Image: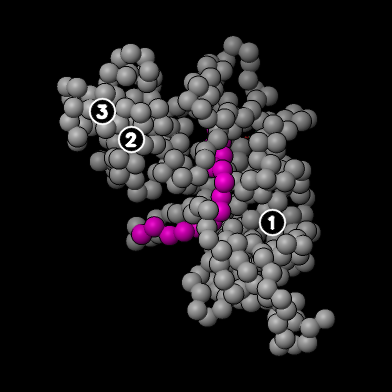
């Protein structure tokens, strides 16, 4: 045991929640410690990997932040991008058999995800409502053909979450998607009854999850996946993308970009447009080209 004021050895940990310059850090042994940030460090975000030391009274001091693999950003009230979470490996875009999904909305989420550099995957929830001839099989097939994982899920079937749990093994994920698709239901089913029983601290309870605005990291009940969640993260959207980021967000456009006759081609009616040619040859689907145009249109004429 360390006496008050003595500092233990440097250890690795991960920020599971933060409250200004105070944070809850999960040590490599899974125990949570309330830590404060050394004065010369910038604010950290949930998901940050840190090196920290015990301060002798169960609390600790964060000494350094390890390099981030990825950052999820959202515009603040003044429109400036702010980091909300770090080291996320997967953006799980949840859609469902009902409300009936519109491919355009899925494409918007995919574009936003591609701009972060974090790999997206699609979760088709409410599989219990899907009948064999449903058009969603074709929709899922189209996204799989683009290289995206489409994982079926149901919170109403025994074993309905097994594929999802397996797909998220060893990753830290976020769930995004329209309201009503079942994000809360999925999260409730995936997390342990008492999420915080794993930690020593009960700074926050899961009931408080919906009222707190900062993100929190949770471990799944099964498998080795983790989730970072907050109301703001669930509403993750297009943010402040420019046209070039939108182009790049349509991953099947990438081989054709830079091959249009005009360098500033906007892939509408321009002669010598490589994207239009690819769409005419069936190499780009008309639905995706339509989504691209709608997203660009929205960027330029944002709804008031
Ligand atoms: P959120 O707005 O994305 O968080 O969605 P909710 O978790 O609140 O779910 C919206 C509705 O869908 C609720 O009535 C849920 O009970 C229902 N729901 C969630 N998952 C499933 C599912 O797998 N199957 C069916 N049939 N309904 C579901
Ligand atoms: Zn073009």
Q: What stretch is highlighted in magenta?
A: 80-96
Quarter of the image with the C terminus in it: top left
x and y percent of residue 10 in the render? 68, 73
Crowd class of label 2 (few under 14; some 14 to 19; many from 20; radius 10 Å): many
Which of the marked residues, 1 or 2, is nearer the chain's N terminus?
A: 1
Distance from disc 3 to disc 1, alpha carbons, whole Å, reads: 51 Å
**94 sits left or right of 290 in the view:** right
Q: Identify the residue position indicated by label 2 in the image.
A: 247
Q: Identify the residue position indicated by label 1 in the image.
A: 206
User: Disc 2 beta carbon < 8 A from ligand 2?
Assistant: no
Q: Identify the residue position indicated by label 3 in the image.
A: 259
Circle 2: element type = helix
x and y percent of residue 160 in the render? 72, 30
Quarter of the image with the N terminus in it: bottom right
Distance from disc 2 to disc 3, alpha carbons, whole Å, reads: 13 Å
Q: Which residue is drawn at 63% across and 15% down?
A: 131
x and y percent of residue 229 in the render? 59, 52
x and y percent of residue 190 in the render? 71, 43
Q: Give the foreground label among 3 and 1.
A: 3
Q: Residue at x 57, y 30 (%)?
A: 149
State if disc 1 and disc 3 touch (CB < 8 Å): no
Q: Which residue is drawn at 50% across and 52% down?
A: 70
């Amino acid at each position: 045991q360390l006496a008050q004021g003595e500092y233990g050895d440097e250890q690795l940990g991960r920020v599971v929640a933060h409250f200004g310059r105070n944070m809850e850090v999960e040590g490599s042994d899974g125990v949570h410690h309330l830590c404060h940030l050394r004065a010369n460090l910038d604010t950290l975000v949930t998901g940050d990997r840190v090196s920290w030391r015990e301060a002798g009274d169960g609390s600790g001091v964060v000494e350094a932040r390890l390099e981030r693999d990825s950052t999820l950003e959202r515009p603040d009230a003044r429109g400036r991008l702010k980091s909300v979470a770090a080291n996320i490996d997967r953006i799980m875009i949840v859609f469902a058999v009902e409300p009936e999904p519109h491919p355009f909305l899925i494409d918007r989420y995919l574009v936003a995800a591609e701009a972060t550099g974090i790999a997206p995957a699609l979760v088709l929830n409410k599989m219990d409502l899907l009948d064999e001839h449903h058009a969603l099989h074709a929709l899922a097939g189209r996204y799989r053909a683009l290289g995206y994982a489409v994982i079926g899920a149901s919170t109403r079937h025994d074993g309905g979450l097994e594929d999802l749990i397996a797909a998220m093994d060893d990753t830290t994920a976020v769930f995004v998607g329209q309201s009503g698709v079942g994000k809360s239901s999925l999260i409730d089913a995936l997390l342990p009854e008492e999420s915080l029983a794993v930690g020593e601290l009960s700074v926050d309870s899961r009931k408080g999850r919906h009222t707190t605005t900062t993100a929190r990291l949770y471990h799944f009940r099964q498998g080795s996946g983790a989730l970072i969640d907050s109301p703001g993260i669930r509403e993750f959207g297009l943010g402040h993308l420019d046209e070039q980021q939108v182009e790049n967000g349509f991953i099947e456009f990438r081989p054709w970009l830079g091959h249009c006759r005009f360098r500033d081609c906007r892939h509408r009616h321009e002669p010598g447009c490589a994207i239009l040619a690819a769409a005419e040859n069936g190499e780009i689907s008309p639905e995706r080209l339509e989504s691209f145009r709608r997203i660009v249109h929205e960027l330029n004429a944002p709804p008031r």
